Image: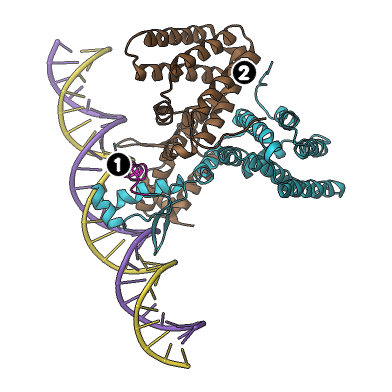
Chain colours: A brown, B cyan, C purple, D yellow
Amino acid sequence: MSRTDEVVDGVRRMITGGELGPGDRLPVEKDLAERLGVSRGSLREGVRALTVLGVLDTRQGDGTYVTSLDPARLMSSLQFVVDLHGDTSARPFHAVRRVLETEAAGLAAHRITPEALEQALAVLEQAARTLAQEPVDHAAFIEADTAFHRIVADQGGNPVITALVEAIAGRTARERLWRGLHEEGAEARTQRDHEAVWRALAAGDAEAARVRMAAHLLDVEETLPGPEVTED
Amino acid sequence: MSRTDEVVDGVRRMITGGELGPGDRLPVEKDLAERLGVSRGSLREGVRALTVLGVLDTRQGDGTYVTSLDPARLMSSLQFVVDLHGDTSARPFHAVRRVLETEAAGLAAHRITPEALEQALAVLEQAARTLAQEPVDHAAFIEADTAFHRIVADQGGNPVITALVEAIAGRTARERLWRGLHEEGAEARTQRDHEAVWRALAAGDAEAARVRMAAHLLDVEETLPGPEVTED
DNA sequence: CGCACCGATTCCTCCGATGAATCCGCGGAC
DNA sequence: GTCCGCGGATTCATCGGAGGAATCGGTGCG
């Protein structure tokens, strides 16, 4: 076990043991290094690793703090590794996205707030205006697409689902998706799919929301490269 | 942007740009540090961060290499942050596990190999023998429970699902789960649920496999603390 | 041909020093 | 009394160098 691993494990124990909680401040580098029996260099490597993982947050001139440990923050590192994958593994990732967003849509049907519903409608109207213009501002449509899905995922009420979807269907993955999607009418169909999801959410129909979201994401999935995942 | 972040971003570019691929060896610390314009200390912090993320692998006396970049390896860091969460957020995590494993069970019904089917049966028989003994070896049953779920998740054929389930329902989470599950007959019911899943898989009935797995994991979920997630 | 040895290579760890950012108390202006 | 600016103290950020540990590959012996 390397010195750095000992640092990571030591901090983990301090957190799980209750000595450190979200927002708490760690001892200064010199003291913590001495306590863990490592040099400052090794300590910094371990702290930096935990920073990348979203567990710690260092501020120059201030100190090192434990983050909120929210799923959203802890999953943010996942986005980095997901973006590292090439187009070849886009399909299994998107399948996960589909399953999670479908569940979120079903959950959202029962608990979406009027504000979120109105906000989602505004996004859809904005997207419709974008499509009505010529030439179509593809970047703006992607932005609206992302915003709509984010609202639905978030209204599912499960922060882990929200964070995972954000990581898997983040900016890079989303751009890669639309880049290979130049078939005629794809954006118009996406718009219709979104509107169908919205109506299901507005009606509080969880089953319809699930089906609409699943169908929409399956449509998208079929445009991805890789072997077809035969369902039934 | 800190020097370390520049290192992480630099290596990321080298990978996404095709200069580095899985298994490739990185330049030695001195050269890479000079190329990226940072000191060896900062370089090491960045490399270490990428190591814990499962992107790089350093071997003393040998060199630093890019890993296979398999989803399984890249998601392994997720297990660390999941284990960091207390019992309070176990429910949203388990809901994700339920959704993913349900999907995996449905997929597995159509593509599970005879060998995996037989192996799963052996696990179930072993678990049955464990339950027949008195006193019951709880650790052994947990082991069999983990093995069964792992086989099903793996046979779903989606490596991302497999890796995510492994991270979310890993060793620590699993132990935490069973620790709070002392109600009478819980293990016997789990065994019956598993057998029902197995029969669905053996029959190639995807819908039955989905329902059985979902019901089983919902049963487990209801024993968790936290607000109930009302479904419909 | 097989095996032990040994030097070269590479990462690992430590140490000390300087720079940069932040915080906090102090004093002055109004 | 309140607000503002300033300077010292604190803390993290970065750098450079040195020695140790592990691995690899060539060499020579049996």
- Whether residue A55 is visible, yes or no, is no
Q: Amino acid at mark 1?
A: Glu
State which chain disc 2 sits on: A
Between A159 and A210, the residue placed more toward the observer is: A210
Horizontal and vertical percent position of residue B91:
63, 29
**What residue do we see at 80% from left, 35% from top?**
B196
Task: Name the quadrant of the C terminus of chain B.
Answer: top right
Q: Amino acid at mark 2?
A: Val
Q: Is A174 situated above or below B84?
A: above
Q: Is A115 situated above or below B205?
A: above
Q: Which secondary structure is most common in the magenta stretch?
A: helix
State which chain disc 1 sits on: B
**What residue do we see at 43% from left, 54% from top?**
B23
Q: Of helix, strand and loop, which one carries label 1?
A: helix
The crowd level at tag 1 (other Cα within 10 Å; few <14, some 14-19, many 20+) is some
Q: Quadrant of residue B180?
A: top right
Between A117 and B1, the residue placed more toward the observer is: A117
Question: Residue beneath label 2, please?
Answer: A211
Is residue A199 left or right of C23 when viewed as pictured? Answer: right
Q: Which residues are magenta?
A: B4-20
Is residue B109 left or right of A14 when viewed as pictured? Answer: right
Horizontal and vertical percent position of residue A54:
44, 36
- Whether residue A60 is visible, yes or no, is yes
Is residue B190 left or right of A176 when viewed as pictured? Answer: right
Horizontal and vertical percent position of residue A137:
34, 16
Task: Name the quadrant of the N terminus of chain B.
Answer: top left
Question: Residue beneath label 1, please?
Answer: B6
The crowd level at tag 2 (other Cα within 10 Å; few <14, some 14-19, many 20+) is some
Residue B61 within the magenta-colored segment of the rendering: no
Q: Are marks 1 and 2 on the same chain?
A: no
Q: Disc 1 vs disc 2: which is toward the camera?
A: 2
